[in-house]
Amino acid sequence: MAENVLVIGAAGQIGSELVMELRRIYGNEHVFATDIKQPPADIMDSGPFQFLDVMDDKHLIHFVVRNKISQIYHLAAVLSGNAERLPIQAWNINMESLIKVLEVARMFEEVHKVFWPSSIAVFGPTTPKENTPQLTVMEPTTVYGISKLAGERWCEYYYRRYGVDVRSIRYPGLISYKTEAGGGTTDYAVEIFYAAVKNGSYTCFLNKDTRLPMMFMADAIRATIELMEQPLEKLSIHSSYNVAGISFTPDELASEIRKHIPGFTVNYKPDFRQAIADSWPHSIDDSIARQNNGWKHEYDLPRMTEVMLREIRKKFQKN
Ligand code: AKB
């Protein structure tokens, strides 16, 4: 039987790229993009889109039943920076929406697979910073991290108690050119490319030597699809997998950009997001994902920088 895939949060940074890849795999008509805001034109033009607020569980259930949904990708979330501005609202949105999706998967056995993104934000200041292991101390100090850690526990609970096949990745900072991120701590690594192309200068909200784990979006999409395609028996983690890409500092990224734009300058004006970044790992040990899923990232810093600058220049030429 054909798979019918529901993507919640299709207009976001991950969703806007994942929907197109899922449509390539399952067929345009079988991938239902939903969000509370309108996604990019290619998503609107290539297959079904509907406004759906995941907090409205009646609408969610109706949608799942009417469209015979068999897989759900629940990508909607309030990211780390925005969550610190409105902690209780962020907690409610991040947690309640996940529980609603898990409940739908528990109630309707036609929904046989769920994907939910976790984050490196599940780690905190007491976690080992270098090559952070899959299983380690986890004492997040941000509301976003607390919600992601609790979410991981709920995912594993639904798997063990009800057999819900829910899969997850602890994404590092994601770097992409199609849709900008919104409200995260790693967003500087996207903003910097736009500023470099547009103005030749950037004011960074993190210190120059703040090292964080990052990943180019093409790698993140591949990691997600590869995890979802694995037979369940091959998976040993039912909370969320560590996956690693590249780690760099704002200063290292700026130097790489300078190889293409020699006059590029960066000022450093750290704000409240510095404390969030300081609580996160520098690099991630993803050996379990490598063993279970054959995971390996492809984009290093030079390759990612080249693609980002090329694609962002094309965007500005069009406008
Ligand atoms: C954020 O910065 O909040 C996100 C994340 C690392 O989960 N990009």
Image: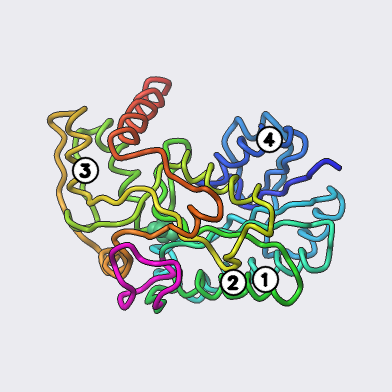
Quadrant including the N terminus: top right
Find the distance from the CA under tag 4 to the CA under tag 1. 28 Å
Task: Let me know if residue 190 appears in the view.
Answer: yes
* Amino acid at the residue labelled 4: Ile
- Mark 2–mark 3 distance (CA, rounded to whole Å): 35 Å
- Circle 3/circle 1 CB separation < 8 Å: no
2 vs 3, front mark = 2
Residue 74, above or below 106 = above
Which of the 4 quarters of the picture holds residue 114?
Answer: bottom right
Identify the residue under disc 2: 95
Give the residue at x 72% y 45%.
Answer: 50
Q: Quadrant of residue 123?
A: bottom left
Q: Which residue is mark 1?
A: 99
> The residue under label 3 is which amino acid type?
Tyr
Q: Is residue 2 left or right of residue 207?
A: right
Give the residue at mark 3: 202
Say above or below: 88 vs 17: below
Q: Please provide the residue range marked out in magenta.
A: 121-137
Residue visible at 69% across and 58% down?
Answer: 232
